[in-house]
Amino acid sequence: MASSPPTIFTTTSLISLLGVTVVGAVAHIASKLLLPKNASAKDRFTFIWLAFDAMIHFSFEGSFLYLSIFGRQVNTSTGPFAEMWREYAAADLRWGNADPGIVSLEILTVLGAGPICCYILKQLANNDPARHYWIVVLSTAELYGGWMTFCPEWLTGSPNLNTSNWLYLWVYLVFMNVIWVGIPLWLMYDSYQHIAQAMRLSHNPAKTKAA
């Protein structure tokens, strides 16, 4: 009798994706509570994204960092976060064995990008235009992190990536990483426009008066 194929979408898969959804819902609620009611749709989306970003960095990626330093590894750890990261490590083996490159990037992400997200959220709530500088800094860092996560792997033939099924390829490897490319690119472009406009006006005060 032929054995049945292994289950791809497991209870851990479901709980992990639900956890991400809950974080998104909390970020949306926070935008309702902390932003002015007359905030633009663009600022509201930016706030939701940055709140989501910060919570993911501190909780999900923070747990990975804890499980991957001082001799620890996800693959040999126990607990719900270890189970969640083993699920992701089925798609990218490096996350299970404390790969030094991945851990180094996550140190910067948790200790650097997370606090910057929170600072920008404060600036958004206060409608401080200086946030656009920090959005460019944050977006550059996150794009760099994404590039350094996957470029070395691609250059060596992707030995650690498992693309054998739709969940690992399209949900874990593609979707869960592409959003940290597409949204930072858009935020960077939008903030560049604000900064460039302010600089042009400062060099042409006559246009400001005419307006």
Image (tube, rainbow, N blue to C red):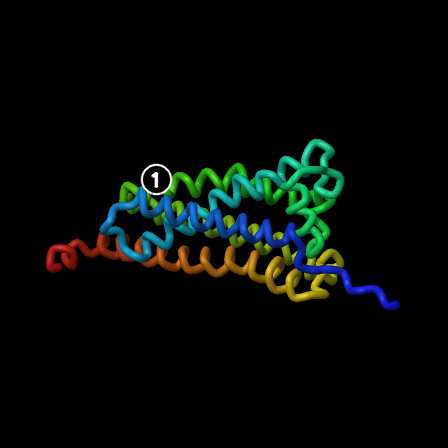
Residue at 66% across / 59% down in the picture?
9
Callout 1 crowding tier (Cα within 10 Å): few <14, some 14–19, many ≥20:
some
**Left or right of 60 on screen, residue 32:** left
Residue situated furthest front in the rendering: 1
Outermost residue on the left side: it is 210
Query: Residue 79 at what x, y percent from top left?
Result: 67, 38
- Indicate the amino acid at tag 1: Lys
Residue found at the far top of this picture: 70
The residue positioned farthest toward the bottom in the image shown: 2
Residue at position x 41%, y 56% from top? 188
Q: Is residue 154 above or below residue 72?
A: below
Total labels: the figure holds 1
**Residue drawn 56% across and 50% down?**
145
Residue 51: x, y in percent?
42, 45
Q: Which quarter shows the N terminus?
A: bottom right
- Give coordinates of residue 146: x percent, y percent: 57, 54
Above or below for 201 versus 60: below
Q: Is residue 58 left or right of residue 119?
A: right
Residue 6 drawn at (x, y percent): 76, 60
Q: Residue at x 68, y 61 (%)?
A: 154
The quadrant of the picture occupied by the C terminus is bottom left
Nearest the eye: 182 or 140? 182
Quick one: SS at disc 1? helix
Residue at mark 1: 122
Closest to the observer, 173 or 116 = 173
